[in-house]
Amino acid sequence: MRRFLAAFAMLLLAGSVHAQQASDTVAPERATPSLVTTQAGAPVRAKEWMVSAAHPLAAQAGADILAAGGNAIDALVAVQLVLGLVEPQSSGLGGGAFLLHWDADGKSLTSLDGRETAPAAARPQLFLDAAGEPLKFFDAVVGGLSVGVPGTPRLLEEAHRRWGKLAWSKLFAPAERLATDGFAVSPRMAGAIAADAERLRSSPATAAYFLPGGKPLGAGDRLANPAYAETLRALAQGGADAFYRGPIADEVVTAVKGAARPGTLERADLERYAVVERKPVCVDYRAYDVCGMGPPSSGGVAVGQILKMIEPFDLATLGPDDPQSWRIIADASRLAFADRERYLTDRDFLPVPLKGLLADDYLASRAALLRTDRALAEAEPGEPEWDHAQLQADDESIELPSTSHISIVDGEGNAVVMTTTIENGFGSRLMAGGFLLNNELTDFSFRTHVDGVPIANRVEPGKRPRSSMAPTIVMEDGRPRLLIGSPGGSQIIGYVAKAIIAHLDWGLDIQQAAALPNILNRFGKMELEAGTAAAELAEDFSALGFESEVKELNSGLHGIAVYPDRLEGGADPRREGVSLGR
C-alpha cells in the first residue's frame, strides 16, 4: 500500500452515517482516506516547449527534434517511431492512431483519423465459429484474422505534410540509430514479454525476436532490431508509399496470410488506405471547451457526455476525497457507456446521432438522473434526437488495455495529442519488417445481431472499428489549456475524464491529476485501483449502492498544462513515461 499524505482536509462521508451495533454503542463515523498522494512528485516546468510520452527514449527523441528547431508535429513523428521500437507491445507502424492538432498561426483545431480498416474481404461473421457463436477472445486475436489495415504510417506522413517543419527524412534518425545500435529492454517491456510468452511463441518471427533461444528477454538486455532499421530507412526515403505499396506491404500480407489462423488482408487493402480528417467533438464545460475525437472513436463523445452530466454539480466543493463526487462521476460514466454501446460506430457506414448525444437538453435530462444520493439502479441508453430513424442493438465488443499516448507543445504554441495503438498487448503477435501487426479487428463486435436487430459496431469491409481512444485538448479563451490522453482500452474514457476533473475542478496540478488513484465505473461495478487509497473506499461505495472490485488499473496518462507564463508536464507514474521541456 502506498503511503498517502492528506493534501486536502479529511472529509466526512456526505449524507451518511455508518453505524455498527455493539450492544447499545455506535461506532464513530469512519474518516475517508485522502486520494491525493505526495508520491506523485512535482510537474516538469518549462518556458518554451514540452513533450510528454510513455518512454524516456521516445520523449528524448521528441525533445531533441524540438531543440533542433522542429515543431510539435516533427517531434511527434520522432516520438512515435521510437515508441514502436522501445514499447512495441503498445503501438507502432503496424497499428493506428487518432490525432488532434492545434495550429497556433491559423488558430484552428483539426483531428485526423488514422484508425485501421477492415480488409475488403472481411465479413460480419468474421469472428463467429461454424455454429454461429463468437470465438474466444484470444483465439480471434492471435494470428492473421484480427489484423486490420495499419493507419499509423500514413497518418504520420499526412500530419507532417500539413504542418511539419523539418525535412521528413531527419525525423527517422533517432529511431534508426536505436534500432541499429540497440537499446536496453525496460522492466515494463520485459514484464509484458514474460507474461505473454506462450502467445508470442505462436509465430516464429515473433518468438525469435522476443524470446531469443526460447527465453524471454529480460530487463536490461540489449536489443537491436535491424529489420526495423531497414523499414525506417525505406520510409525516410520513400514516404508512406514505401509501407503501403513496396516490399514492406508484401511482408505484411505474407505474415497475415501465412499465420496459423490466416486473415483476409490483401495488397490492395493497403494501397487504398487513406487518413480521414474529421471535425473534432467539442463540449463546453464550465469555462472551457473540451475537444476530442469523434466517431469511430467513442472517446470524445463519452468524455464530453460525462463532463456535461456532472457540470450541474459542485464537484469543486465536494473534492476528490468525497465518495459522492465519485458516485456522480461513476453514474455519469455508466450512462455514457450505455449510449456508447448502443449508438457509436464508424459514421461512414452507419448513422450516429452525434448532435443528439451531445445536445444540451438531452444531457440535462440525463444529468437529472444523477440528482440522488445513491447509485442508479439501472443505466440504460437514452433516446437522443436522430437526424432520421434507426434501430440498433447493444454492442458486445471487447477492448483490453494497451496503447500509448503522446502530448506535445512547441515553442510557437502549436499543440498535438495522439493516442496510438496496436490494440491488445503485442497485437496479433505477428511481425513484419521489424514491427508488430495490430489485432484491431477484434474491436468490432463479434456478434452481428441481437434478437434480429443489427449491432452498429459489426464487422464490414473497409469499416473502422469503434475505439475508446480519447486524445483531448481543453481550450480556454481560444487557446490550448490542457493536453491529455491515456491508454487502457475502454477504461481510457474514465482515465481521461478523471484527469480533466482533477485538474479543472479539484485544482490538482497535471502530475497530481495523472497520479490520482483510478476509480472507474463502466457497466455498474466500481473499479478501484489496487494498492492505492481508492481500494479503501469499497465500504463507502457499498453504502451508496455500488458493488466494487479492487483491481490493477494501469493508466498511462501523459499531459501538459498550458499557462500564460509556463508549461507543466505530467507523466503517469504507473508506466515508464516522462515529460521533458525547455
Image (cartoon, helix red, strand yellow):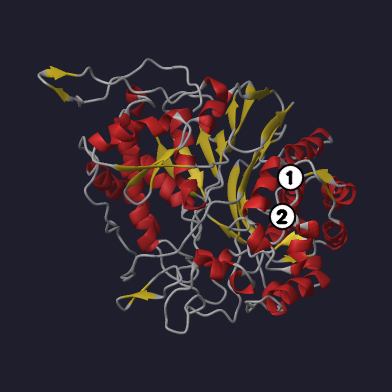
Residue that label 1 marks = 79
Kindly report which numbered mark, 2 or 1, lies closer to the viewer in this rendering.
Answer: 1
Q: Nearer the viewer, residue 187 or 362?
A: 187
Hey, which residue is sitting farthest front in the picture? 23
Quadrant holding the C terminus:
top right
Q: Mark 2 or mark 1, which has the lower sequence index?
A: 1
The picture places residue 352, in percent across and down from the top left corner, at 40, 63
Q: Is residue 300 above or below residue 466?
A: above
Residue drawn at x 45%, y 40% is 497
Residue at 41% over, 17% down: 8
Q: Nearer the viewer, residue 571 or 364?
A: 571
Residue 90 visible within the image: no
429 versus 305 height, above or below: below
How far across and how far down the image is residue 300, in percent?
47, 49
Look at label 1 and name its amino acid: Val
Q: Residue most toward the bottom?
A: 130
Which residue is painted at 83% across and 52% down in the image?
168
Name the residue: 86% across, 47% down.
182
Q: Nearer the viewer, residue 215 or 288?
A: 215
Task: Tell me if 166 is positioned left or right of 360 in this view.
Answer: right
420 left or right of 184? left
Kind of element beneath mark 1:
helix
Rendered image quadrant of residue 95: bottom right
Q: Is 63 drawn above or below residue 247 in the view shown?
A: above
Front-most of residues 321 and 372: 321
Checking the image for residue 156, the label placed there is 2
Left or right: residue 499 compared with residue 539: right
* Image quadrant where residue 501 sits: top left
